[in-house]
Image (cartoon, grey):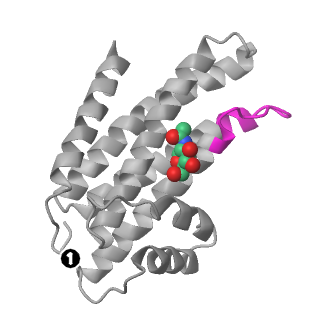
């Protein structure tokens, strides 16, 4: 089944990441010690939808395997988003067979299942291009991932009174994507126009 290969793909990719993130990226210099706080603050200042507290809570537990620079932070944000989108993908699959949803909600859930499946592969790709320092391409993919969350959410909003059972998941994915996107933008700025 196609989603089984997604599973294998994304997890072998995560494993691969665990290995390669031990290799150091060249650090962007001149950054203060509390990088997470600085980045979350800068991103929140730039955008009205960006959630500072969520950014802080999500990025604080950055593992020591990640270098504390913008690259390390962006990578960690993308890994969190990948974990999120993968977990949600599997919980939607469970929801589809739970018998708890009416045909309308099931239709929406099926759309979301497809969207989240695409989200998994887009995130894997965004990490891949990011590691090749193709930051613009990573941006495009991350924006598409955020769009995925919004599109899933909107499917439910089309019928009045319909509550989206994935509201929290969609919001989490959107915000994690936003963190990665903003961090990569700051990284591109810091590096000048090195990105391709
Ligand atoms: C998604 O990420 C958020 C923030 O890191 C976390 O609180 C939440 O539990 C994650 N959800 C899933 C389904 O992985």
Query: In percent of the image, x 35 and y 63: which residue is there?
Result: 74
One can see residue 173 in this view: no
| Residue at figure coordinates x 44%, y 73% from the top left | 36
* Pick the front one: 159 or 45: 45
Q: Which residue does the image show at 47% across and 38% down from the upper left?
A: 85
Residue 78 lies in the magenta stretch: no
Tell me if 178 is positioned left or right of 128 in this view: right
- Residue 80: x and y in percent read 42, 49
Q: Residue 173 at what x, y percent from top left?
A: 53, 47
The residue range painted magenta reads: 154-168
Q: How many marks?
A: 1
**Label 1 residue near ligand 1, CB within 8 Å:** no
Q: Quadrant of the N terminus?
A: top left
Residue designated by label 1: 27
Q: Is residue 155 shown above or below 42?
A: above
Residue 60 visible, this angle: yes
Residue 159: say if magenta: yes
Q: Residue at position x 53%, y 79% from top?
A: 41
Q: Position of residue 181 (x, y in %)?
A: 41, 63
Q: Splitting the image into four quadrants, where does ligand 1 fall?
A: top right
Q: Quadrant of residue 155?
A: top right
Q: Residue furthest right?
A: 161
- Describe residue 17's horizontal placement relative to residue 3 as left or right: left
């Amino acid at each position: 089944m196609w989603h089984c290969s997604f599973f294998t793909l994304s997890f072998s990719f995560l494993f691969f990441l665990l290995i390669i993130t031990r290799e150091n990226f060249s650090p962007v210099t001149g950054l203060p010690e509390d990088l997470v706080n600085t980045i979350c603050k800068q991103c929140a200042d730039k955008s009205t939808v960006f959630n500072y507290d969520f950014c802080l809570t999500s990025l604080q537990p950055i593992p020591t395997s990640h270098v504390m620079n913008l690259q390390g932070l962006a990578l960690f944000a993308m890994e969190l988003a990948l974990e999120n989108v993968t977990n949600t993908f599997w919980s939607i699959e469970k929801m589809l067979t739970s018998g708890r949803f009416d045909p309308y909600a099931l239709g929406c859930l099926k759309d979301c299942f497809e969207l989240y499946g695409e989200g998994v592969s887009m995130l894997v790709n965004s990490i891949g291009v990011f590691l090749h320092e193709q930051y613009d391409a990573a941006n495009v993919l991350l924006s598409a991932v955020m769009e995925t969350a919004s599109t899933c959410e909107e499917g439910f909003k089309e019928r009045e009174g319909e509550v989206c059972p994935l509201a929290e998941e969609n919001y989490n994915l959107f915000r994690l994507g936003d963190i990665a996107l903003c961090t990569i933008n700051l990284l591109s700025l810091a590096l000048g126009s090195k990105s391709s």
